[in-house]
Image (cartoon, rainbow, N blue to C red):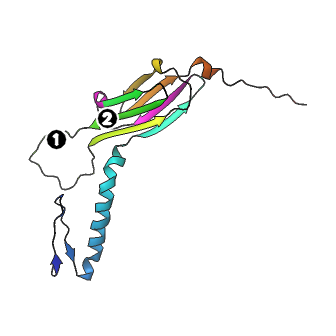
Amino acid sequence: MRNTVTNVNQNNHDLSVSHNPTDFRSLMNYFWNFIDSSNSDFLELSPKIQVTEDKDAVKVTAEIPGIDEKDIDLKISADGMLSIGGEKKNKSEESNKDNYFSEISYGTFKRTIQLPWDLDYEATTAKYNNGVLTVSIPKSQNEKQKFKKISVAKS
């Protein structure tokens, strides 16, 4: 490219800028890819969560693919804060092989949610299968008795 200004930032990202109008599209693609990649690692590792309840328990399901169960840190506090954390480790078999590009994220994550029920935290169980973590927390007797079914009669 003619009329190119080349610079490298602290992270060794090539910040080349061309003054050729036909290269404007390439410049914009580089810019948006750079902006997207700076925030995407945390978002990609943060587990997607579903919270459901039935009459006896609250179930929290989290998608955490590519992580061993020993690398999951699961905590629940007495005030109903459930924290799911862990680390997705980079398993590199050949360290001298260069990647052309990679969309696979590695690193640590943590997600904390507030559970708005009176639950029996001591009886919490967790299972991990095929990248899905399922946490089951039974409701306390007080929570089970909070609602009463009321019959509606026709007048």
Q: Residue at x 65, y 20 (%)?
A: 145
Q: Which residues are magenta?
A: 56-71
In primary-sequence order, the first of circles 1 and 2 is 2
For the residue labelled by badge 2, is the local secondary structure a helix, a strand or a loop? strand
x, y percent for residue 22: 26, 80
Q: Which residue does the numbered mark 1 point to in the structure image? A: 92
Magenta-colored stretch includes residue 24: no
Q: Position of residue 24 (x, y in %)?
A: 28, 76
Q: Amino acid at mark 2?
A: Gly
Left or right of 149 on screen, residue 152: right
Q: Nearer the viewer, residue 61 or 43?
A: 43
Q: Which residue is mark 2?
A: 86
Q: Quadrant of residue 68?
A: top left
The span from disc 1 to disc 2 (Cα, nearest Å) is 19 Å
Q: Quick one: which residue is furthest to the left in this view? A: 96
What residue is drawn where x is 28% and y is 36%?
Answer: 87
Q: Is residue 65 magenta?
A: yes
